[in-house]
Amino acid sequence: MEALTVAQLKEQAGDSPLYAEVDLQLQSRSIKSTRANKPYLELAFADSTGSFSLKIWEDRPLFQAARDWPDTVMIRLAGKWTQNQYGLDGNDLNARVLDAAERALFLTGDPELQAKQHHDWEFIVAICASIRDPRLKKITGKFFEKFADNFRRSAAAKRNHHARRGGLVEHVAQMMRAAHALCAVYPSWNRDLLFAGVLFHDCGKLWENSYPKDGFNQIHSLRGEMLGHIPIGIEVVNSLWREMLEDPECSGWLTLEPATEDVRLHLLHLIASHHGQYEFGSPTLPRSPEAFALHYIDNIDAKMEMIKDSYATAALIAPQIYEKTFPLPANLVTPLAEFQAPPETGPDAPPTSEEATAARADNAAAG
């Protein structure tokens, strides 16, 4: 039986038990106690497509084995899976450690997701190459030179949206697509500044939500814990900017307009204000068109990812109504389908695709 990914398991599991096997890496393990003082294990698992937590009770056969698993072990976990608003649950579970060949294959990740992230990465690089302001173009290039590998391994969040290895690339690429489309609607925006802001707005996540080269456990960094991604992002851009200005080819930039120092300040402002509100962690509020645009583009893409995940995992509680999933504020309902015009009939109706194909074949035979 072919193992499912975490994303596939979340899509397929529901109220009725689903037998499935899934390859996983252990992220964390803690021993807790019920109110009756009975111990149980809380395990966090992940693969390239996502993560979930699972409780193993003391009276389950897997309890002893799971307690002795080494950190970051890679296993195949099989059993009967269900899912509700609290997440996945497994019964009649059994597990075995992956062998060397299976571990190597597991670490390559889901092929479809890898292809998508590769396409997204190429799009990000192409957009940044199209930046016309030499200062913003240069600093994006320096960022790629120093941090490309780490950037491509980082998540956009610990949970809620794009919380997977490479998720930051997916998030940034989709934000750039949205920014590119909106710049055509609002031509007064500074396109170069907005694209650079999209690239750098979450660059602090490289220290807050990164992954090792050989696993799917998010790395806990003291820098990320103590500072958070917004101050780190400001620090990264300032450091790259200083390095950039030391390059002899940048010596003539003092005469450019807008002033080089103003460009730096506006880019830093996009990073500092992108959460949009003080209570959400921004040290300042958006104060420019590009800052407002970045905040809302970021929020839209995060929400659309949460909605997509909710439709894939939430149970129907009534016709067309889905169970509420955190952190969305309310139950989702089935989206309204696109309007489909009824086929025209009568002598003046355009030919159907089948009729058009037959007519081309007749013409070819006659010719």
Image (cartoon, rainbow, N blue to C red):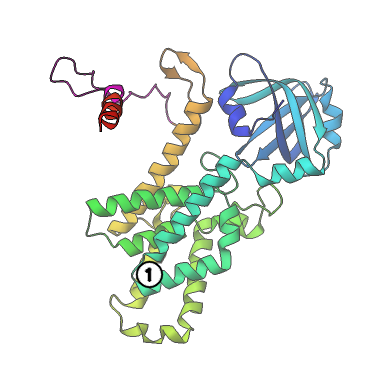
Q: Quadrant of residue 14?
A: top right
Residue at horizontal 66%, vertical 56%?
Answer: 221
Q: Could you say where residue 73 lies in the image, as x and y percent from the top left?
A: 79, 41
Q: Quadrant of the C terminus?
A: top left
Q: Main secondary structure of the magenta part?
A: loop
The residue segment tinted magenta is 329-355
**Residue shown at the point (23%, 18%) measured from the top left:** 343
Q: Residue furthest left?
A: 348
Amino acid at dot 1: Leu
Q: Quadrant of residue 195?
A: bottom left
* Residue 147 image position (x, y, % from top left): 57, 64
Of helix, strand and loop, which one carries label 1? helix
Q: Which quarter of the picture shows residue 112?
A: top right
- In terms of depth relative to the viewer, which is nearer, 40 or 173? 173
In the figure, is residue 210 to the left or right of 318?
Answer: right
What residue lies at 80% left-to-right and 29% top-to-bottom?
95
Q: Which residue is mark 1?
A: 265
Is 300 placed above or below 122 here?
Answer: above
Q: Is residue 93 above or below residue 231?
A: above
